[in-house]
């Protein structure tokens, strides 16, 4: 592969295309997901403890993501047979918190040749040369990369945060606003900062009861 082909996708880039085998049959990415949000994530290996807790958690939230027009797509550098055996073990034997009998129905890519993990910068050689790190790419319905999270092998991800980030992206797209630190859905959002002296004056003097002005550059509003 050329250096250009290995360039990591960055926020705002088109999601790189690939074809892959998965536990649910072949996937042509991102074409198969046009019109939907996708959470595309890697895990280091099947039959490992942290990954098992992550898969159970993520699978248990699948319907919550579907309700947000979002599909899940996993990947590791393991064979489809290994994935199948691991997912069967999870369903038949594993309990974690209040989760048991969890069936993972989202597709899990088998990336034995490491082609997809390289394409998405999921292999970080100083962490591991054989296992993907815990990467999360949030890809929008136009197949554009909108957010990227990277976690090391040792730390399981917070999937409530992944969901919160997805809702933030959907909210800011829909309403042309931004979300503050630790924002939770339903809370006040941030109104765009005025871009001229006149607009700044108008902002601090606004009579709009829905806007809460802290200063000319920091104003909040509640979405109805
Ligand atoms: C785990 O999922 O438990 C794990 C995987 C690879 C390295 C360390 C931990």
Image (cartoon, grey):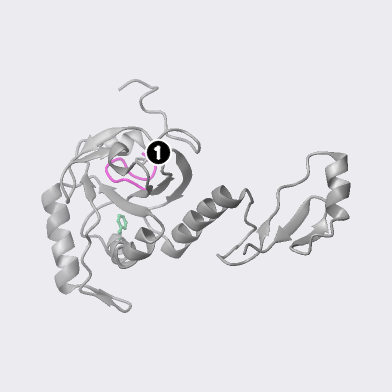
- State which quarter of the image contains the N terminus: top left
Q: Position of residue 166 (x, y in %)?
A: 47, 54
Q: Nearer the viewer, residue 83 or 197?
A: 197
Front residue of 2/139: it is: 139
Examine the rendering and report whether any part of residue 43 can be seen: no
Judge from the rendering whether residue 51 lies leftward or rightward of residue 213; answer left or right. Answer: left
Residue at image mark 1 = 143
* Residue 56 found in image quarter: bottom left
Percent of width and height locating residue 175: 60, 51
Give whichever of 73, 220 is nearer the camera: 220
Give the quarter of the figure containing the C terminus. bottom right
The boundaries of the magenta stretch are 124-133
Q: Which x, y percent locates residue 216?
A: 83, 51
Residue 164 is left or right of residue 116, and the answer is right
Label 1 residue near ligand 1, CB within 8 Å = no
Look at 63% across and 62% down and name the residue there.
223
Q: What secondary structure is the magenta-colored segment mainly?
A: loop
Looking at the image, the residue that sits furthest to the bottom is 98
Relative to residue 95, is residue 224 drawn left or right?
A: right
Quarter of the displayed picture in which ligand 1 can be seen: bottom left
Dot 1, crowdedness within 10 Å: few (<14), some or many (≥20)?
Answer: many
Q: Is residue 96 visible?
A: yes
Q: Is-magenta flag for residue 206?
A: no
């Amino acid at each position: 592969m050329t250096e250009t082909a290995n360039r990591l996708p960055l926020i705002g880039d088109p999601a790189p295309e690939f074809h892959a085998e998965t536990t649910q049959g072949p996937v042509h990415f991102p074409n198969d997901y046009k019109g939907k949000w996708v959470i595309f994530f890697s895990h280091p290996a099947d039959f490992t403890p942290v990954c098992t807790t992550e898969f159970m958690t993520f699978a248990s939230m699948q319907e919550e993501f579907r309700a947000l027009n979002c599909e899940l797509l996993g990947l590791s550098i393991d064979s489809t047979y290994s994935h199948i055996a691991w997912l069967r073990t999870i369903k038949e034997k594993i309990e974690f918190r209040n989760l048991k009998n969890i069936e993972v129905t989202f597709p899990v890519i088998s990336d034995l040749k490491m082609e997809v993990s390289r394409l998405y910068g999921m292999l970080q050689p100083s962490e591991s040369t054989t296992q993907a790190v815990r990467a999360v790419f949030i890809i929008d319905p136009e197949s554009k990369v909108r957010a990227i999270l990277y976690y090391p092998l040792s730390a399981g991800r917070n999937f409530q945060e992944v969901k919160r980030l997805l809702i933030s992206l959907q909210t800011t797209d829909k309403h042309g606003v931004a979300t503050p630190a630790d924002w939770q859905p339903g809370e006040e959002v941030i109104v765009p900062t005025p871009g001229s002296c006149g607009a700044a004056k108008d902002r601090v003097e606004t009579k709009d009861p829905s806007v809460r002005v802290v200063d000319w550059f920091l104003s909040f509003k509640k979405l109805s």
